[in-house]
Image (spheres, helix red, strand yellow):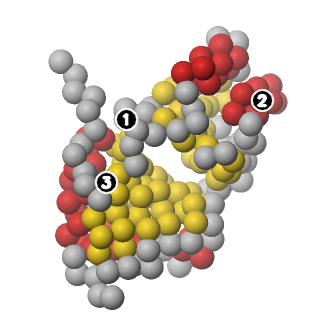
């Protein structure tokens, strides 16, 4: 039988860094590119999907992350079954695009504090210099050989999305890397 339970990850505090799992959070992958797709998404979610690469939009605790020219991840706890049903009926069934619930595929880990980018830099080839000074940016990169999506939603506050199968491994790596932080 498939185990869809989330990993047991407890909140940790390190010098100038707090790390915690934020679950359950509803996550939806959207794909589409025509005007009707954008109009319907805007009406259903009350959000304008970002069209500039590596950006995001947030309204009423719902965030939309640009992943590619025709792909977004939308996440938040305000996305309920009625919203999912509306998206399915108005987008997928009308062949305007695709709607896939990926809530059980991705684990959301929040990193908050002045040492966020010091830890991320230890395991990622990405240059965080410009990223860390800009809010509402998104990057897909590797972190200790694991594919992740990073959403810099506020100064020194990053939502990290990792596939559930790698979440405990990455959690342990973050804990090990954070244990060497100085105040």
Q: Residue at x 54, y 41 (%)?
A: 76
Q: Is residue 136 above or below residue 60?
A: below
* Spatial CA span between label 2 and label 1: 26 Å
Q: Residue at x 22, y 22 (%)?
A: 2
Report the mark closest to the observer, 2 or 3.
2
The residue carrying pointer 1 sits among few (fewer than 14), some (14 to 19) or many (20 or more) residues within 10 Å by Cα, namely some
> Label 2 belongs to which residue?
43
Residue 121 appears in the figure: no
Report the mark closest to the observer, 3 or 1.
1
Residue 84: percent from left, percent from top: 57, 23
Q: Earlier in the sequence, mark 2 or mark 1?
A: 2
For this view, does 113 lie left or right of residue 59?
left
> Label 3 belongs to which residue?
146
* Residue 8, label in figure: none
Q: Secondary structure at mark 2?
A: helix
Q: Residue at x 48, y 35 (%)?
A: 26
- The one nearer the camera, 155 or 66, is 155
- The one nearer the camera, 50 or 53, is 50
> Label 1 belongs to which residue?
105
Evaluate if marks 2 and 1 touch, with contact meaning CB atoms under 8 Å apart.
no
Report which quarter residue 25 is drawn in: top left
The residue carrying pointer 2 sits among few (fewer than 14), some (14 to 19) or many (20 or more) residues within 10 Å by Cα, namely few
Report the mark closest to the observer, 2 or 1.
2
For this view, does 112 lie left or right of residue 90?
left
Q: Is residue 106 above or below residue 127?
A: above
Residue 37: percent from left, percent from top: 74, 27
* Spatial CA span between label 3 and label 1: 14 Å
The residue carrying pointer 3 sits among few (fewer than 14), some (14 to 19) or many (20 or more) residues within 10 Å by Cα, namely some
Residue 83 appears in the figure: yes
Q: Secondary structure at mark 3?
A: strand
């Amino acid at each position: 039988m498939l185990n869809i339970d989330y990993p047991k990850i407890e909140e940790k505090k390190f010098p100038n860094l707090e790390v915690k799992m934020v679950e359950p959070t509803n996550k939806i992958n959207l794909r589409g590119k025509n005007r009707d797709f954008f109009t319907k998404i805007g009406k259903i979610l009350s959000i304008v999907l970002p069209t500039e690469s590596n950006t995001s939009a947030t309204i009423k605790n719902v965030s939309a992350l640009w992943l590619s020219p025709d792909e977004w991840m939308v996440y938040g706890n305000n996305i309920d079954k009625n919203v999912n049903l509306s998206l399915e009926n108005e987008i997928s069934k009308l062949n305007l695009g695709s709607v896939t619930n990926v809530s059980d595929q991705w684990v959301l880990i929040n990193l908050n504090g002045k040492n966020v980018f010091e830890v991320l830099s230890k395991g990622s080839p990405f240059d965080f210099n410009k990223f860390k000074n800009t809010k509402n940016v998104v990057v897909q990169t590797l972190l200790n050989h694991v594919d992740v999506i990073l959403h810099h939603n506020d100064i020194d506050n990053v939502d990290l999305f990792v596939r559930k199968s790698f979440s405990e491994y990455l959690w342990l790596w973050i804990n090990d890397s954070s244990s060497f932080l100085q105040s």
